[in-house]
Image: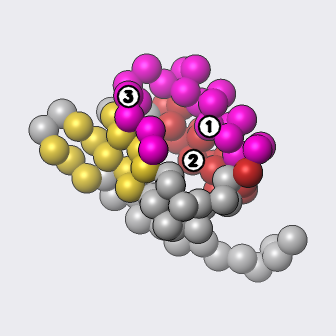
């Protein structure tokens, strides 16, 4: 584990009317970052689309994401 790792992703939402999109495709999202994002997803009632393709979130990251989706009722499109 690299404790000096710095990860930067663009979380500025793309707004299209009432749709809020986080496009994190190809952004190097791993398990650790996915657990942080999962907490944000839980409390974000405006996020409707999330694109995570071509990332390596692993099984534990997928579990964290699934748990956050149980709480978030706004997210309707996940890729």
- Crowding near pointer 1: few (<14 within 10 Å), some, many (20+)? many
| Disc number placed over residue 76 in the picture, else none | 3
Q: CA distance from mark 3 to mark 1?
A: 13 Å
Disc 3 to disc 2, C-alpha distance: 16 Å
Of residue 3 and residue 61, the one placed in the foreground of this image is 61
Pointer 1 or 2: first along the chain: 2
Above or below: residue 20 compared with residue 32 = above
Location of residue 63 in the rendering, given as x and y in whole percent from the top left corner: 71, 35
The image position of residue 33, as x and y in percent, is 64, 56
Residue, disc 1: 65
Q: Residue furthest left?
A: 17
Q: Residue furthest bottom?
A: 4
Start and end of the magenta stretch? 59-79
**Circles 1 and 2: CB atoms closer than 8 Å:** yes
Q: Nearer the viewer, mark 3 or mark 2?
A: 3
Q: Residues within 10 Å of mark 3 (few under 14, many from 20)?
A: few
Q: Is residue 10 left or right of residue 69?
A: left
Name the element at disc 2: helix
């Amino acid at each position: 584990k690299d404790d000096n790792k710095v990860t930067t992703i663009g979380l500025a939402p793309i707004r299209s009317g009432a749709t809020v999109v986080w496009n994190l495709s190809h952004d190097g999202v791993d398990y650790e970052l996915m657990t942080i994002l999962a907490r944000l997803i839980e409390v974000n009632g405006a996020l409707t689309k999330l694109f995570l393709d071509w990332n390596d979130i692993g099984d534990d990251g997928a579990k964290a994401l699934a748990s956050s989706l149980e709480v978030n009722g706004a997210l309707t499109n996940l890729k």
